[in-house]
Amino acid sequence: MIKAIISDFGGVLTTPLFGGFARVMEAQGLPLEALGHAMVKASERHGENPLFDFERGRMTEAEFFALLGDALEEEVGRRVPLQDFAEHYFSHLSPNDELIAHLRRVRDERGIRLALLTNNVREWEARWRSLLPVDELFELIVDSAFVDMRKPEPGIYRLTLERLGLPGEACAFVDDLEINCEAARDHGIHPIRFESTAQVVRELDALLDAA
Ligand SMILES: [Mg+2]
């Protein structure tokens, strides 16, 4: 029986992130693939994708953009100002009001508990929190940047279940990345891979009705 829904933030409760990245590069008059190439280069230097340590709160925003900025400069032949990345990025994100309303409905009408499990950035906390009423919606928020772990690491799922006081089998998990859904399944959690709001609403309702 499902007692809680654990939701991802970016790409589930917001419009897709891809558009955000594309617009940031577009504003600089640069092709999106240049950013991809720079990320590959930065990953080689850092030992893994630097976004991972950025999301674990082990790397500051300044350190992350210095590393990425160096790689991007080599890629495009000029220094690209990345300091207003977050501003561009968040100005093009909007909340998924339909899904948020549905989560609120299942909470209020069926007593389903709501948790947020997000890979996020410490310096961006005020920005992402201002996009939706997180504290009103969720009884628990697990943010990678404050727990030194990120999805799909097993520890962050264990921590979320522990803080909810529930076994994985009592939880549904919604995320737009397959790798995060697979990791949830390893903990007995019922994953729903976000493809569209209608599909998630349908699958959540089926899961809740199955009990
Ligand atoms: Mg996501």
Image (cartoon, rainbow, N blue to C red):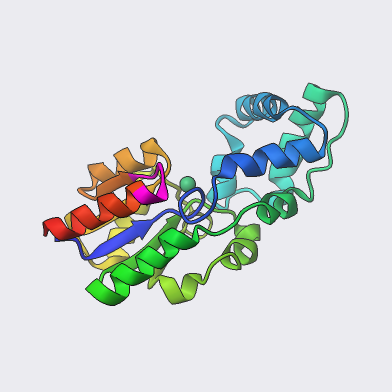
| Horizontal arrangement in the rendering, residue 145 relative to residue 161 (left or right) | right
In the depicted structure, whether residue 1 falls above or below residue 111: above
Q: Is residue 6 left or right of residue 72?
A: left
In the image, is residue 197 part of the stretch drawn in magenta? yes
- Determine which quarter of the picture holds residue 73: top right
Is residue 171 highlighted in magenta? Answer: no
- Number of marks present in the image shown: 0
* Horizontal side, residue 114 vs residue 86: left or right: left
Q: Quadrant of the C terminus?
A: bottom left
**The magenta segment:** 193-198
Q: Residue at x 86, y 34 (%)?
A: 79
Q: Quadrant of the N terminus?
A: bottom left
Given residues 156 and 137, the one toward you in this image is 137
Residue drawn at 57 percent across, 66 percent down: 129
Q: Nearer the viewer, residue 108 or 150?
A: 108
Task: Name the residue at 28% across, 60% down.
Answer: 161
Classify residue 130 by image quadrant: bottom right
Judge whether residue 204 can be spotted in this image.
yes
Q: Residue furthest left?
A: 211
Q: Is residue 156 left or right of residue 14?
A: left
- The residue at the point 68 percent across, 37 percent down is 22
**Whether residue 168 is visible:** no
Q: Nearer the viewer, residue 11 or 197?
A: 197
Residue 62 rendering spot, x and y as whole percentages: 74, 49
Q: Position of residue 24 (x, y in %)?
A: 73, 42
Residue 73, relative to residue 209: is it above or below?
above
Which residue is more in the foreground, 185 or 132? 132
Residue 184: percent from left, percent from top: 29, 46
